[in-house]
Image (cartoon, rainbow, N blue to C red):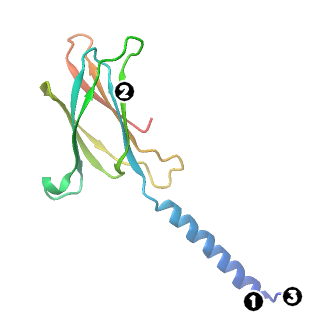
Amino acid sequence: MQICRRTALSLGGSLSMAALSGCSRLSSEPSYLSLTLLNFDSQEHELILEILRADADDYVDAVVVKDQYKLSAPPVDRVASKRVEDEILESDTYIVNVGLEESPATTDTYHFYPALQDDDERNDRLFIEIRTERDSSELYFDFQQNR
């Protein structure tokens, strides 16, 4: 069986389009944001977490997460206690507000930006850490992303 030039080009073009359409479908799959909450302080804390859509017009539409998490004091053999919340919501640009229930003056805000869609190792994880200042024992938050 012989294949003419026109048939060969047509088949090659169809296969190329099929391959490309498969790639574009894979890159449009949603990515999710996960949280790791760490307590480096020697006391138990209740973390207040609020995650807002950055592009919302009003507060009611912006709120996607509003929750509290109890973080125990670190065990004797560890420097921090840890709580992991995997894939809590679809990854997007967010404003993250945190505070401590027992210390209303201890608050902070972080702007979360997702990894690039073409990043092969896309893993959107936000680390929220409760830490203590060495000199004053004041509590503060530290944020890390995608480490």
Q: Could you tell me how far apart the alpha carbons at marks 1 and 2 are, in whole angstroms?
A: 63 Å
> The residue under label 3 is which amino acid type?
Gln
Q: Residue at x 29, y 18 (%)?
A: 73
Spatial CA distance of label 3 from label 2 is 66 Å
Q: Is residue 58 left or right of residue 131?
A: left
Q: Nearer the viewer, mark 1 or mark 2?
A: 2
Identify the residue under disc 3: 2
Q: x%, y% of residue 34?
A: 38, 42
Q: Amino acid at mark 1?
A: Arg
Circle 3 sits in a helix, a strand or a loop, which is it? loop
Amino acid type shown at disc 2? Lys
Name which of mark 3 and mark 2 comes first in the sequence. Answer: 3
Mark 1 vs 2, N-terminal side: 1
Q: Which mark is residue 6?
A: 1
The residue that label 2 is drawn on is 82
- The kind of secondary structure element at disc 2 is strand
In the rendered view, tell whether residue 130 sits above or below residue 94.
Answer: above
Residue 47 in the image, given as x and y percentages of width and height: 22, 31
Q: Is residue 137 above or below residue 111?
A: above
Residues under numbered marks 1 and 2 in contact, where contact means CB atoms less than 8 Å apart: no
Query: Residue at image x 21%, y 28%?
Result: 46
* Classed neighbour count for the residue bearing mark 2: other residues with Cα under 10 Å, few (<14), some (14–19), many (≥20): some
